[in-house]
Amino acid sequence: MQDSFGRKIDYMRISVTDRCNFRCRYCMPRGIQTSPMSDILTYEEIIEIVTIAAQCGISKLKITGGDPLVRQGITWLVQELRKIPGIRHITMTTNGALLTLYAKNLKDAGLEAINISLDSLDRKVFSEITGFDKLDNVLAGIDAALSAGLQVKINSVLQENCNVDEWQALLNIAKDRPIDVRFIEMMPIGEAKNFRSVNNEELLAKIRGKYPAITPDTSIHGNGPAVYFKIPGFLGCVGFISAMNKKFCGSCNRIRLTANGMLKPCLCFAKNFDLRKILRETNKIDRPEKLALTIRTAIEAKPQAHSFENEELVSEYRKMFEIGG
Ligand code: SAM
Ligand code: SF4
């Protein structure tokens, strides 16, 4: 369906857990509390929401978290979501550390593509950012995803005074393999307020300096707001997700379901719609209509744009691992 600014909203990001096997310092630092399992939506509840959301026009899903691979039975969920009439594409974002175990089964369950977050190829820096010495597991996970036939994208968040100089090494992943490497500007949510993001405009200028023949690539690469460029001789593209320096709200197509069942119209603002309450407090007969009404109201409530450039207006108080990114 369309929101009140005429944007077609057909994409839902679903956080299936707020738990994670990493502790990325800008997302989920050590010592943080996760929710009791009773607060987290069951798979049956997620399926019920998606069934109604599909009737409201949602056709594309991204499974996220926390890390979706730490939740047991995730492959089953993908398989069941795939059966819902109207759901045409399911993708996932993960830190990749467990992908060697799950890639093939996820592909067989109907997952089409996977985004793997990787901020550093330097073992020490990787451990500093994520809290774990698991770089090799993630690299093996990338190989496993490719071997399973999943489309793979790498998501890298570059920070000043940390991994900013790694853009070349990360970009090289796209050289010999059909993997898009995307650089994501860090948004000032939760812990990330304490770190300084790289400016993607400046990064593109650096990449252009090294590869003057780089050209925009207008083919469709997925559901999201990334802007892509092709570098001659590279199999994959380089993408930029520049929420801070190049707002893309005019083409926003998404809503977000948090692990505890809150539907969020926009990442920047705390406003959310409590679907868990409807699921748990409404009888089975009235639920579909109530869910549909609330999903439609949430879509209509999407603001025209985020306000990340003006931190005083950012009302979201939850951290990224709770929302799903
Ligand atoms: N654990 C999975 C992963 O790391 O891909 C899924 C959840 S994670 C919250 C999704 C993505 O959000 C990751 O690529 C992560 O780097 C990114 N992220 C986390 N905090 C962010 C922030 N403040 N601004 C921009 N991206 C952020
Ligand atoms: Fe976990 Fe992903 Fe957050 Fe890192 S970015 S702590 S992997 S949820």
Image: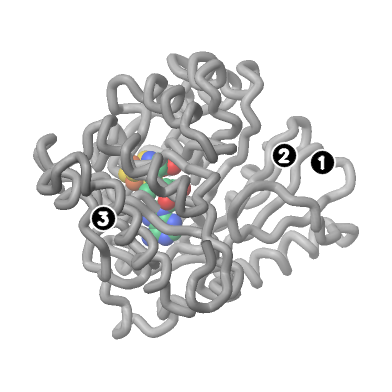
Quarter where residue 161 is shown: bottom left
Could you give the CA–CA distance between mark 2 and mark 3, rounded to whole angstroms?
46 Å
Task: Please tell me whether residue 168 is drawn above or below residue 196 in the rendered image.
Answer: above
Name the residue nearer the viewer: 11 or 267: 11
- Residue 295, percent from left and from top: 35, 58
Of label 1 and label 3, which has the lower sequence position? 1
In-front residue for pair 12/321:
12
Q: What is the CA distance from the residue labelled 2 to the residue labelled 1?
A: 6 Å
Give me the disc on residue 88. Answer: none
**What percent of the width, then of the height, locates residue 128?**
35, 44
Q: Are marks 2 and 1 in contact (CB under 8 Å)?
A: yes
The label shown at residue 290 is 3
Q: Earlier in the sequence, mark 2 or mark 1?
A: 2
The image quadrant that residue 199 belongs to is: bottom right
Please report the residue visible at 63 percent of the width from the left and 58 percent of the height from the top: 226
Q: Position of residue 51 (x, y in %)?
A: 40, 40
What kind of residue is marked 1?
A: Phe
Percent position of residue 30, x then y: 19, 45
Q: Which residue is mark 1?
A: 234
Q: Is residue 43 visible?
A: yes
- Choose the circle earlier in sequence order: 2 or 3: 2
Q: On the image, numbered disc 2 is attached to which residue? A: 174
Q: Amino acid at mark 3?
A: Lys
Q: Is residue 121 visible?
A: no
- What amino acid type should be assigned to the residue bearing mark 2? Ala
> What separation in Å lies between label 1 and label 3 (alpha carbons)?
49 Å
Q: Is residue 316 above or below residue 312?
A: above
Could you tell me which residue is drawn at 60 percent across and 51 percent down? 223
Q: Residues within 10 Å of mark 2 (few under 14, many from 20)?
A: many
